[in-house]
Structures are given as structure tokens and as C-alpha cells.
Image (cartoon, rainbow, N blue to C red):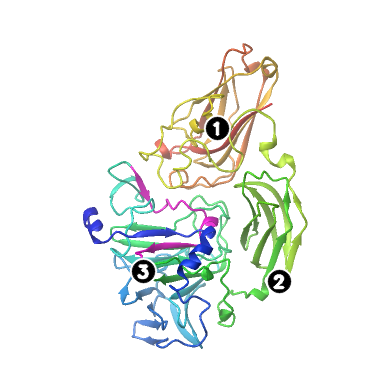
């Protein structure tokens, strides 16, 4: 389908759901969806049949779906008489399809559960009487099966958009086969979802009269933490895809976790957002407690965590509390007024608790969570020395918050390729005291693009008479790119060792999130210029023996740079 033909079909809008908009979304759509709080009495028409190749489930509302009996694929998704499932001859399924599987069905009152067994992997579909929802769980027990996602494949022409995660109107590739350039120089890719996991509750499209969504799970068995970015959705000429990513290796900072993930929910509405009762923070599934889902832990087998407050915060920034161990991860936002936080429905165990200022870890400790109990923590005090922003500085570029925020092109890079026509020039030097030094400094540095960038600054006589520490904070790196500095062509630092960072693409696929690291350089007094009317010149080079060329050369993302007093 050509671009003009696609536009002629029907223009459609899209929505990325935010937790912050939950209340308004719920009120706007309360009549659009029966929801998980519907009564237990079976709706007229609720039930299932076997057509020989598929189990056919009628929810008794407006949704009928089919699951293949030999492979566990979702082969049909009909809402109010319209078939939504499928593009390019492909079904909706775990990963790219499990292949031969054992598929069984059982009905327990107002719930129908379809179970899919493929080796050590178990996948489940559940339908509730009177609801336009499909509840899904996936249990990956080990690495014997590649299962990193569930993808809902949607027919072409039903929902169209020209947003960052859409490449409907272009076929010109910029990088690999998944980043595209339009004729106006703007870039598109399924990677450009903009949102961190903490930022959204659901993903999907609406026509205004019909909405199709995936409401995400709590991601307790996913990896990467609250600020991880991954594929959420794509749209192309042959159809669209909605994703629940269970594990994604690109720019990944953690090992894969195994076990049961879910529920996540495929849901239809009459055009509005999904009911907030389906959101991972509010959804409860006591009706699933006795269904025999492998790895399922009911609320009674979980614990809670509450902290009375956090002191030592910089109130200009949001703070997040994360919990993580090898088996699970969770997080919650700290209240801006006093730092109070709570995290619900946690699997029992010992966790590392981390407090983040923005996305920068500034405190950690160990906590134990027990089943059926609430662990209450006294006030957490963040030591002043844990926040690098508290160190006195002669000058500073950016903010120590674990992100490239404020630097040139930072706002664009989560939803565009660095070559995008909207990006300001990646080159250009910076003068401290100009008033625009941070916004003039590029958020990313590459060996083959803008290595050798210069920073000009003056020192007083007293400052020039002393040695100083220069710090460069980074948020991730590609191909071991790291900064080496030269001061006034008089002193050059050693090449620092590369910190541990993800080995895959990052800077070109919408993610700056890796492992925050601070490089410190002890600059001797002999390197400074003693004439206070002259500028000192700092040159920052990116060094590495890896990478290729252009924006795939070795590179790094900048958090902050400062010269300490």
C-alpha cells in the first residue's frame, strides 16, 4: 500500500497511556469497557467451541477470539464483527511463534483458560464472561526457549499513524533494516517509543469508535528496571504490532529473569482508553488463584514495602525507589513532599533497595520482604556525598540526574535517529559563561562524529594555582566509547578503562539508559594557563578500538561534566 493510498484509507490516532492520566482515563471510559470488575454471572453467549483447528472463545460481550490447537497462536481477534488479527500471514503469539505445542482448555465458571505448553515454557490465555479482555501470562523457566515478547499483529488499514514508532510512509533505511528516513529527513523506527517502563500503563491505537490496547504487566520478571526503554508498538504498510516485552536484550543492563510474568491484557474499548481497573497497579485477579497457572503467586503469598520518608533529597527532581534481586524487580515513586513511598505485591525475598534521583542511583541498602506482611522502613537519609551535585564546582555542564537532559538534542534522541533532520549540528564548541553552554553541548559524543569537542573557560589566579578534578558522568556507551581529555595541549589524561555497558546498539535506537558511570581526571596545576585573561581549553576525545563509522562508531551519552573547586 502506497503512502497516498494509506492516507486514503482512514487517518487514525494513537495513545500511549501514562500512570499520571489514570484517573481521567477511567472517568472518560467507564462506559466503554465491562472491565475486570464485571459480575461473575455468565453473560449471554459466553462459552467456547472447537472448530477442529482452533479453540473459539466467545466472551459474551463483543469479543470472539481463536487460539490454534497445535501451536498456541492467537489466530483470530474479532471485535464487534471486525477481524483485527494478522498481517503478512502471521498470527499473534509469543516471540515469533512457538511452533508445535500442547494446547488445552478448561472452563471454571465464568472463566475460560487456554494453556499452551512448549518444552519448559508455559503460556496462558484467560477470558472472563462479559469482558472484552484477554488476560495473558507467560512463564519462561529457562533459556531453552527464546521467548522475549508477546506481539499482537494487527491488520493493515485499521489503525494508521505517522508517529516516531511508525514507518508506514517510508522504505528508505538509515541503519540496519529497522530505522527509516522519510523524504523530509525525519526518521522512524519501532524502537522510538519515547516511554520508559515507568511512564506508561498501556499502549495501542484508537479510531475514536474502537480502541485496541495492550495493558502492560507489572514487569516483575522483566529486566532493566523502571527506566528501561523497549519496543512498544510499530506501524508499517503491512500492518501494526503491539508488544509486551518480557525480556529484550538491546541496551540491557541486567541478566534475564525467569518465571511467570503477567497478567498483561489485550483489551478492546469503544474508542476510549482502557479501564484503569486493568492497570498493573490496580488489577487483582483472585479469580485466577485456583486455575493452576504454573508459577502463579496470589496476593496472600506476597508482601508489601513502605518507607516513611527520604531526607537529603533535591526537591527539584523526582525520586524513585527500586527493588531488585535475581528473581524479580519492582519500583515506586517517592512522594515529592516528604519522600514517602510504597511498593505492593512483592514476591518474598531479600532485595537491593535503590533510591534514584532522576535516574541516578544515590542510595542503596538491603531489605527483606515476607509473605503476607508489610515491611516498614524508617526515614532514609541520603548522605550528601552520595549526590555528585553537592560537590562544589568551578563550572558545571548539565545536571547530575542520570540522564542527558538539557544537553543539545537530548529531547529528540528518545524518538529519532541522530541523523534526523530535526537534530541540531552535533559539532560545535562551548564557552563556559555564555549562558547557553549546556544546551550547546551535544548529549552524545562519537569517535567518528564529534570527537575532539572543545570547552573554553577561564580560571582565577587562585584556581589556576591548584590541581583540580574534572568529572565526566555518562549514562551508557556504545562499542566501549569513553572520554579522554586534554587540557591546553599541555596535559593529556591516560585512556580510562571502559566501564561495564551493554554491548548492543543504544544511542541510535532511542535509548541512553545503560550503567551510569563517572570518569574522574586529576588535572595538575601545571596544565592551567596562569594568564587569567586567557581561556583554558579542554578537549574531549572519544577513544575506543571498537565500533564502525558515523553514528555507529564508538560513542557515549553525557550525564554531566564539571570542574571541581
Query: Of residues 67 and 268, which is closer to you in this image?
Result: 268
Is residue 239 within the magenta segment?
no
**Residue 73: where, in percent of width, then height?**
39, 73
Marks 2 and 3, how far apart in space?
A: 41 Å
* Residue at mark 2 to residue at mark 1: CA–CA distance: 47 Å
- For label 3, the residue is 210
- The crowd level at tag 2 (other Cα within 10 Å; few <14, some 14-19, many 20+) is some
Q: Which residues are magenta?
A: 186-208
* Residue 206 location (% of width, % of height): 37, 64
Viewport quadrant of the N terminus: bottom left
Query: How many angstroms separate mark 3 from mark 1 (CA)?
Result: 51 Å
* Element type where label 3 sits in the image: loop
Residue 285 relative to residue 104: left or right: right
Q: Mark 1 = which residue?
A: 483
Residue located at (63% from left, 18% from top): 459
Q: Nearer the viewer, mark 2 or mark 3?
A: 3
Answer whether labels 2 and 1 touch (C-beta < 8 Å): no
Q: What residue is pinned by disc 2? A: 371
Q: Is residue 144 left or right of residue 392?
A: left
Direction from residue 377 to residue 25 in the image, left or right? left
User: Tag 2's secondary structure?
Assistant: loop
Most foreground residue, 455 or 52: 455
- Which quadrant of the figure contains the C terminus? top right
Residue in the image at 35% along x and 68% along y: 209
Amino acid at each position: 500500500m502506497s503512502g497516498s493510498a494509506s492516507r486514503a484509507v482512514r487517518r487514525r490516532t494513537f495513545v500511549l497511556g501514562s500512570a499520571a492520566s489514570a484517573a481521567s482515563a477511567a472517568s472518560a471510559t467507564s462506559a466503554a469497557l465491562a472491565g475486570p470488575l464485571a459480575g461473575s454471572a455468565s453473560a449471554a453467549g459466553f462459552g467456547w467451541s472447537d472448530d477442529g483447528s482452533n479453540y473459539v472463545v466467545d466472551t459474551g460481550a463483543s469479543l470472539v477470539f481463536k487460539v490454534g490447537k497445535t501451536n498456541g497462536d492467537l489466530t483470530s481477534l474479532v471485535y464487534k464483527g471486525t477481524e483485527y488479527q494478522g498481517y503478512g500471514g502471521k498470527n499473534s503469539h509469543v516471540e515469533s511463534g512457538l511452533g508445535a505445542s500442547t494446547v488445552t482448555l478448561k472452563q471454571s465458571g465464568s472463566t475460560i483458560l487456554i494453556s499452551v505448553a512448549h518444552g519448559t515454557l508455559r503460556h496462558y490465555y484467560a477470558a472472563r464472561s462479559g469482558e472484552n479482555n484477554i488476560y495473558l501470562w507467560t512463564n519462561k523457566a529457562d533459556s531453552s526457549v527464546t521467548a522475549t515478547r508477546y506481539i499482537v499483529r494487527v491488520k493493515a488499514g485499521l489503525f494508521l499513524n505517522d508517529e516516531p514508532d511508525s514507518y508506514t510512509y517510508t522504505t528508505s533505511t538509515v541503519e540496519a533494516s529497522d530505522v527509516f528516513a522519510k523524504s523530509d529527513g525525519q526518521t522512524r523506527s519501532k524502537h522510538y517509543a519515547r516511554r520508559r517502563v515507568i511512564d506508561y500503563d498501556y499502549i495501542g491505537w484508537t479510531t475514536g469508535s474502537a480502541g485496541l490496547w495492550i495493558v502492560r504487566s507489572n514487569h516483575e520478571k522483566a529486566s532493566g528496571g523502571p527506566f528501561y526503554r523497549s519496543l512498544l508498538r510499530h506501524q508499517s504498510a503491512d500492518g501494526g504490532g503491539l508488544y509486551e516485552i518480557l525480556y529484550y536484550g538491546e541496551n540491557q543492563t541486567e541478566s534475564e529473569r525467569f518465571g511467570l510474568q503477567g497478567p498483561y491484557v489485550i483489551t478492546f474499548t469503544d474508542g476510549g482508553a482502557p479501564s484503569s481497573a486493568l492497570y498493573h497497579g490496580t488489577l487483582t485477579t483472585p479469580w485466577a488463584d485456583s486455575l493452576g497457572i504454573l508459577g502463579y503467586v496470589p496476593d496472600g503469598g506476597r508482601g508489601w514495602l513502605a518507607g516513611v520518608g527520604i531526607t537529603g533529597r533535591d526537591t527539584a527532581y523526582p525520586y524513585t525507589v527500586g527493588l531488585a534481586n535475581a528473581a524479580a524487580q519492582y519500583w515506586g515513586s517517592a512522594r515529592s513532599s516528604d519522600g514517602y513511598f510504597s511498593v505492593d505485591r512483592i514476591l518474598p525475598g531479600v532485595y537491593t533497595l535503590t533510591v534514584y534521583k532522576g535516574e541516578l542511583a544515590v542510595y542503596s541498602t538491603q531489605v527483606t520482604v515476607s509473605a503476607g506482611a508489610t515491611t516498614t522502613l524508617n526515614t532514609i537519609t541520603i548522605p550528601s556525598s552520595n549526590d555528585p551535585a553537592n560537590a562544589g564546582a568551578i563550572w558545571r555542564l548539565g545536571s547530575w540526574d542520570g540522564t542527558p537532559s538539557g544537553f543539545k538534542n537530548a529531547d529528540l534522541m528518545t524518538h529519532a535517529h541522530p541523523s534526523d533532520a530535526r537534530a541540531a549540528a552535533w559539532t560545535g564548541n562551548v564557552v563556559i559563561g555564555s549562558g547557553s553552554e549546556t544546551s550547546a553541548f551535544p548529549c552524545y559524543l562519537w569517535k567518528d562524529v564529534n570527537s575532539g569537542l572543545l570547552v573554553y573557560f577561564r580560571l582565577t589566579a587562585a584556581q589556576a594555582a591548584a590541581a583540580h578534578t574534572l568529572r565526566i558522568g555518562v549514562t551508557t556507551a556504545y562499542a566501549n566509547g569513553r572520554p579522554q581529555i586534554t587540557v591546553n595541549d599541555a596535559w593529556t589524561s591516560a585512556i580510562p578503562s571502559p566501564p561495564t555497558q551493554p554491548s548492543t546498539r543504544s544511542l541510535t535506537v532511542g535509548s541512553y539508559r545503560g550503567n551510569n558511570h563517572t570518569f574522574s581526571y586529576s588535572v595538575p596545576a601545571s596544565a592551567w594557563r596562569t594568564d587569567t585573561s586567557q581561556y583554558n581549553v579542554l578537549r574531549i576525545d572519544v577513544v575506543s578500538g571498537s565500533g564502525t563509522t558515523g553514528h555507529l562508531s564508538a560513542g557515549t551519552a553525557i550525564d554531566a561534566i564539571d570542574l571541581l573547586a
